[in-house]
Amino acid sequence: MANRRAIWLLLALLLASALYLAWGLRQPYGFILSLRGTRLAALALVGASVGAATVVFQTIVGNRLLTPGIVGVDAMFVLIQTTLILTLGGIGYTALPALPKFLIEAGCLAGAAMILFGAVLRAGAADMTRLVLTGVILGILLRGLTGFMQRILDPSEFAIAQASSVASFNAIDPVQLAIAAPLFAVALVFCLRLAPVLDVAALGRTHARALGVDHDRLVLLALALVASLVAISTALAGPITFLGLLAASLGGAMLPNWRHALLIPVAALTGALILVAGQFVFERLLGLQSTLAVIVEFLGGLVFLALVLKRRPI
């Protein structure tokens, strides 16, 4: 009963936050509703993608303090943007067609993540610590390379690179959204189908193998889904590092147990609610004086510190 109440509460809050579609609406109504509707769908999709991916990732690595961004996906996205600007120039970058750009970025991010997972886990999925440490080091390396490349850009191109490396929902392309939505739906369905096996995997590799679960195969499949979800959300709007931790922690706190059949949708709804409600606060209460990503990162950082200081996950 408590599980159902949590889901219905999140749905009700999400629908209430979506009322910003009609907040202060004025002519031309159709044009404004179209822009707000696209933004609302992108907010919900990105939040749900990151929330679901984080829950699966935390279960596989066995740590409730980590997020998929730890493997360097965010740093890879910024490097791709900087490379495109350095190669094509600022004008050429802004003239890139939206759909090919999205597909290239999502493909590169997912491919790079899977190459990392395959290279590190080629001898088996037992050493998850090595995966996490490799991801951290790779992220530092990519950020250093990105910083070097940005130093040789002219000021106008550097400003474009800085703007493109921060998550933004102000200019979501409807075509990109139309491609991202079905990809997200397919990945989420696969995550939910893995939920019973993830419950067993949460007991640890030894116990999971003793109960008949092919743990190594499960890890590779789960990480492929995580890479897909993170690549879709990052290519669509940009990186938000602490969103997943915030969604997974708050979603887990609302449930009396860690059954993934409930935890995954609750974390997805929580992530969507955080972004939709945050966008409402950003637009109406802060008057567009800050960015939504900054607000989410600030709150996520506070949650991370709270989890570390408590010495146990929520």
Image: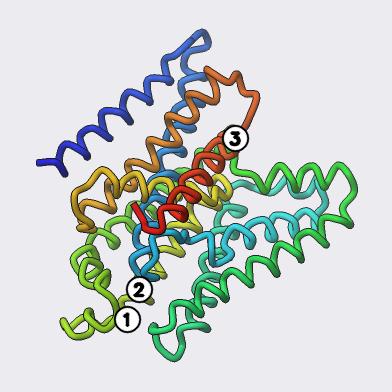
Neighbourhood count class around disc 3 (C-alpha, 10 Å): few under 14, some 14–19, many 20 upward: few
- To which residue does mark 1 refer? 217
**Label 1 vs 3, first from the N-terminus:** 3
| Left or right placement of residue 185 versus residue 35 in this view | left
Q: Amino acid at mark 2?
A: Leu
* Residue 45: x %, y % from top left: 41, 43
- Secondary structure under tag 2 reads helix
Q: Residue at x 41, y 15 (%)?
A: 22
**Label 2 vs 3, first from the N-terminus:** 3
| Left or right placement of residue 162 versus residue 104 in this view | right
Callout 1 touching callout 2 (CB < 8 Å): yes
| Left or right placement of residue 213 versus residue 77 in this view | left
Q: Residue at x 21, y 51 (%)?
A: 262
- To which residue does mark 2 refer? 221
Q: How far apart are labels 1 and 3 at the CA level?
A: 39 Å
Q: Which quadrant is the N terminus positioned in?
A: top left
Q: How far apart are labels 1 and 2 at the CA level?
A: 6 Å
- To which residue does mark 3 refer? 171
- In which image quadrant can residue 273 be found? top left
- Residue nearest the viewer, comparing 104 with 72: 72
Q: How far apart are labels 2 and 3 at the CA level?
A: 33 Å
* Residue 253: x %, y % from top left: 29, 46
- Secondary structure under tag 1 reads helix
Q: Residue at x 33, y 48 (%)?
A: 267
- Residue nearest the viewer, comparing 130 with 68: 130
Give above or below for 243 relative to 278.
below
